[in-house]
């Protein structure tokens, strides 16, 4: 259209305007090429991963406070191998008609086993069946948000374990 035509003169593509006009052609591309994206974790991230790995090995679990939305928080704890097996066994024993039903039950169980605190309420001393009741009474959208946050927590812990195995 007219705007495109205004950007191209008879000699070819539009010439740079403003600050770009002062730079020799190709300099902007060279600057972009020299900007390197860091390969791997920062020093602070490496230290955090090693601390998570160390905590798992020597304390047998890891907990972390996670911001959920602007004003809410949860504290998640890692699950034991026995707890993960229990979750899997319970899911295997249930007959689901849809994938959605399976995913919902998986989220409820996983959050119930992992949720140590929710907005200042401490669930550490509750039996899992009581935590399950608390979680299942939450609005389904809240469970989805908690499940997503838990997934990020689990991924972070797994990355820390992998990094720790290679660098501890």
Image: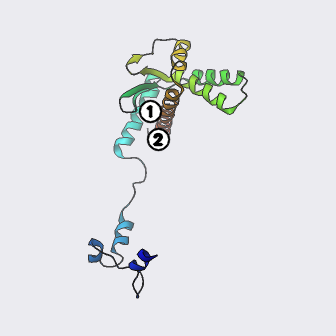
Quarter residue 16 falls in: bottom left
Please name whichever residue, 160 or 107, is drawn nearer the observer in this view of the structure.
Answer: 107
Q: How is the image coloured?
A: rainbow
Distance CA(mark 2)–CA(mark 1): 8 Å
Quarter residue 13 falls in: bottom left
Please name whichever residue, 9 or 58, is drawn nearer the observer in this view of the structure.
Answer: 9
Which residue is outermost to the front?
Answer: 2
From the viewer's perspective, is residue 147 above or below residue 129? below
Name the residue located 44 percent from the left edge and 33 percent from the top edge.
53
**SS at circle 1:** helix
Place of residue 4 in the rendered image (x, y in percent of width and height, measured from the top left): 43, 76
Question: Which residue does the numbered mark 2 point to in the structure image?
Answer: 163
Name the residue located 34 percent from the left edge and 42 percent from the top edge.
44
Q: Which mark is residue 53?
A: 1
Place of residue 131 in the rendered image (x, y in percent of width and height, measured from the top left): 51, 16
Quarter residue 86 falls in: top right
State which tag comes first along the sequence, 2 or 1.
1
Q: Are marks 2 and 1 in contact (CB under 8 Å)?
A: yes
Q: Answer with left or right where residue 106 lies relative to residue 66.
A: right
Q: Answer with left or right where residue 108 lies relative to residue 167.
A: right
Please name whichever residue, 113 or 146, is drawn nearer the observer in this view of the structure.
Answer: 146
Q: Answer with left or right where residue 144 lies relative to residue 92.
A: left
From the viewer's perspective, is residue 123 above or below residue 72? above
Q: Answer with left or right where residue 155 lies relative to residue 14.
A: right
Name the residue located 30 percent from the left edge and 75 percent from the top edge.
17
Place of residue 55 in the rendered image (x, y in percent of width and height, measured from the top left): 42, 28
| Crowd tier of the residue under label 2, counting other residues whose Cα lies within 10 Å: few below 14, some 14–19, many 20 or above | some
Q: Quadrant of the C terminus?
A: top left
């Amino acid at each position: 259209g007219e705007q495109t035509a205004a950007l191209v003169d008879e000699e070819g593509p539009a010439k740079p305007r403003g600050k770009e006009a002062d730079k020799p052609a190709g300099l902007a591309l060279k600057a972009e090429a020299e900007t390197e994206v860091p390969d791997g974790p920062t020093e602070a991230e490496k230290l955090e991963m090693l601390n998570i790995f160390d905590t798992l090995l020597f304390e047998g679990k890891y907990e972390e406070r996670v911001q959920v939305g602007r004003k809410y928080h949860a504290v998640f704890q890692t699950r034991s191998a026995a707890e993960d097996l229990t979750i899997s066994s319970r899911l295997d024993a249930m007959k689901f008609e849809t994938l959605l039903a399976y995913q919902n039950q998986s989220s409820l169980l996983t959050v119930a086993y992992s949720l140590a605190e929710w907005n200042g309420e401490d669930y550490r001393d509750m039996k899992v069946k009581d935590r399950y009741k608390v979680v299942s009474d939450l609005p389904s959208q809240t469970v989805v948000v908690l499940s997503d946050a838990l997934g990020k927590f689990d991924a972070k812990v797994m990355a820390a374990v992998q990094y720790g195995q290679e660098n501890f």
